[in-house]
Amino acid sequence: MKCDEIQEQASQYIDGELGDADAGELFAHLGTCLQCRVFLRGSLELRSKIHDDILKTEASVTQKTKKLVGHQEHAIRFALDKNRLSLSFAAAIGFVTVIVVATLLASLALRTSDPGDNPEPKVVYLMSLPTVEVQGVYPVENQ
């Protein structure tokens, strides 16, 4: 077998795609060929460096994401605090009292004083029947 084919098998071995029979041929050739052993070692080192770089990148992205999300959460909290109205308990009680009194005065002002202006309410009866759906097998009449 040529070294190009063995190097292709070495790549398949690294990726976990090489069968047992072909792996035996690969290792037999690696025992006799320095060039293919150097290729396999270099490929394994490259894969390891790429894997390490991916892990470092993932960690960096995770850290930056957490930092960014933390800044956004702080900005959201600041915006909520900025739009919040804070009153003391006494001021809140006073505010609620004013609203209740204003509502009562408005309802008294809008109410008519002559009961003849308001006609008697009509009684309306509404009836609703439920929809019934029947599912199943219907018997066939014998003829």
Image (spheres, grey):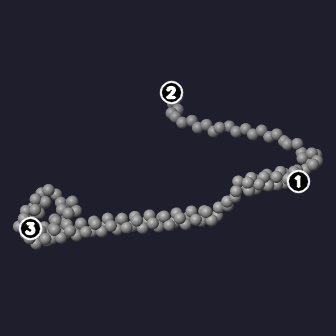
Left or right relative to 57: residue 45: left
The residue singled out by tag 1 in the image is: 109
First-in-chain label (1 vs 2): 1
- Of 127 and 108, nearer the camera is 108
The residues tagged by marks 1 and 2 sit, at their Cα atoms, a distance apart of 78 Å
> Looking at the image, which residue is at 55% across and 66% down?
75
User: Label 1 amino acid?
Assistant: Ala
Residue found at the far left of this picture: 32
Circle 3 — which element? loop
Circle 1 — which element? helix
Circle 2 — which element? loop
The residue singled out by tag 3 in the image is: 1
Left or right relative to 114: residue 31: left
From the top left corner, tell me how far across and down residue 97 is, in percent: 78, 52
From the top left corner, tell me how far across and down residue 85 is, in percent: 67, 61
The residues tagged by marks 3 and 1 sit, at their Cα atoms, a distance apart of 105 Å
Q: Is residue 23 visible?
A: yes
Quarter in which the N terminus is drawn: bottom left
User: Label 3 amino acid?
Assistant: Met
Above/below status of 98 relative to 62: above
Judge depth for marks 1 and 2 and give the one in front. 1
Which image quadrant for residue 95?
bottom right
| Contact (Cβ within 8 Å) of mark 1 with mark 2 | no
Which image quadrant for residue 20?
bottom left
Residue found at the far top of this picture: 142
The residue singled out by tag 2 in the image is: 142
Judge depth for marks 3 and 1 and give the one in front. 1
Judge depth for marks 2 and 3 and give the one in front. 3
The residues tagged by marks 2 and 3 sit, at their Cα atoms, a distance apart of 81 Å
